[in-house]
Amino acid sequence: MPTSPESPRHSEWLASTDLPTVHGVFAMHVFRTTIPDATQGHQEHVALVFGEIAGQVGLPVRVHSECLTGEVFGSLKCDCRDQLDMALSEIARMGAGMVLYLRQEGRGIGLSNKVRAYHLQSQGYDTVDANRMLGLPDDARSYEVVPEMLAHFSVQSIRLMTNNPDKLAKLSALGVKVDECLPVVTEPNQHSIGYIQAKRRRMGHDLPDWVED
């Protein structure tokens, strides 16, 4: 998945180390964006690699965006932490794969806007309407670093671990060869079910139609 020499590079590799986790030992690689974001400057993204992936075809890959509230503080309002854990566990089970952990809090709107949207959701608005009431897009994430991170490991094509058709479309438009999508479906709880149902109904995510209690 080579990048054109005429195209500007969006990231550079900085460092790596082995990272023992509850799912097994992953190699952690840190990349930094070379083109600063207008509000957040240069971002550092992570590739968590399991097994031998160089030159692989159909490699299981989860492109995952940061969620401070769920992954650090244990918020029950979303399925982000559950999806990350499931992806890491499945990649270890399959013997090879990668999680690309991108620093795009709140689907790219940033932490403070995410908290503002959370407040609106607590008043009864769903995740889509909350963003729109703040004058924000439904999903502001970008993925220009992904083909470069894959090219660093000479990965030829991937099996994308996602339920999100927009992510598939954006990655494909960037030249990432996706052989198939692997679902990452977790069980909702009483706090997250409304959020997850909104992703299915309003954003087209490939998810079951759970009945809300």
Image (cartoon, rainbow, N blue to C red):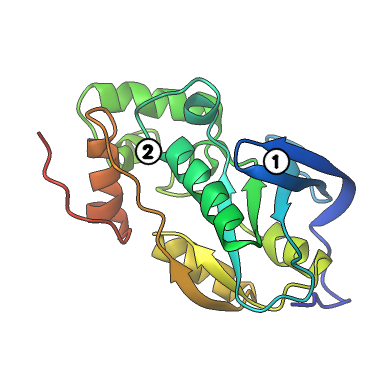
Above or below — where is 177 with respect to 97? Answer: below
Disc 2 and disc 1: Cα gap in Å? 19 Å
Residue holding disc 2: 131
- Residue at the image point whose x is 28% and y is 28% from the top: 121
In the image, is 12 to the left or to the right of 155?
right
Task: Identify the secondary structure beneath mark 1.
Answer: loop
Mark with earlier residue (2, 1): 1
Mark identifier at residue 18: none
Q: Can residue 141 be seen in this view?
A: no
- Residue at the image point whose x is 80% and y is 74% from the top: 3
The quadrant in which residue 181 appears is: bottom left
In the image, is 134 to the left or to the right of 212?
right
Q: Which amino acid does label 1 sit on?
A: Ala
Q: What residue type is labelled 2?
A: Asn
Residue holding disc 1: 38
User: How many numbered callouts?
Assistant: 2
Q: Where is residue 145 in the image (x, y as percent from the top left)?
A: 72, 58
**Figure quadrant of the C terminus:** top left
- Residue at the image point whose x is 46% and y is 30% from the top: 114
